[in-house]
Image: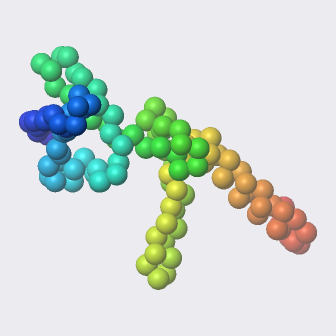
């Protein structure tokens, strides 16, 4: 899908531009208020721009744009939901830590290896 958007001057002397994104674009792209978007010019499309959502690791703050991200999430019976978006290194560390904790808790269990 394509949208034609208009940039307007922020009018604060910074030289920044404001790009208002319509609700249907946000919904189609799966973006929400507070998401970080990366703006890239695409010369092949006659001055078009490409917006990419940037996900930052909730632990170390690393951008996961290049590698993708993992999600550690819980949904409790009372309806509360919480989670962390993690870079590959932090996700691997969390998984290894949880596996190690499991091994320690069951070290002397009979019948398990």
* Of residues 75 and 106, the one drawn nearer to the viewer in this rendering: 75
The residue at the far front in this view is 13
The mark tally for this picture is: 0
Query: Is 27 located above or below residue 64 in the figure?
Result: below
The residue sitting at 50% across, 76% down in the picture is 76
* Residue visible at 87% across and 71% down in the picture: 109
Relative to residue 17, is residue 80 depicted above or below? Answer: below
Quadrant of the image containing the C terminus: bottom right
Quadrant of the rendered structure where residue 10 is?
A: top left
**Residue 50 position within the rendered picture, expressed as x and y whole percent measured from the top left:** 24, 31
Is residue 72 placed above or below 60 in the rendered structure? below
Q: Is residue 43 left or right of residue 80?
A: left
In the rendered image, the quadrant that contains the N terminus is top left
Q: Nearer the viewer, residue 15 or 56?
A: 15
Residue 51 location, quadrant:
top left
Image coordinates for residue 79, horizontal then vertical, percent: 43, 78
């Amino acid at each position: 899908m394509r949208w034609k958007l208009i940039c307007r001057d922020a009018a604060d002397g910074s030289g920044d531009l404001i790009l208002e994104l319509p609700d249907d674009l946000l919904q189609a792209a799966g973006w929400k208020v507070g998401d970080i978007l990366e703006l890239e010019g695409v010369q092949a499309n006659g001055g078009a721009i490409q917006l990419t959502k940037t996900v930052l690791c909730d632990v170390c703050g690393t951008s996961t744009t290049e590698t993708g991200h993992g999600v550690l999430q819980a949904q409790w019976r009372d309806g509360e939901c919480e989670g962390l978006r993690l870079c590959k290194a932090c996700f691997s560390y969390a998984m290894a830590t949880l596996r190690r904790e499991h091994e320690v808790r069951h070290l002397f269990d009979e019948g398990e290896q």
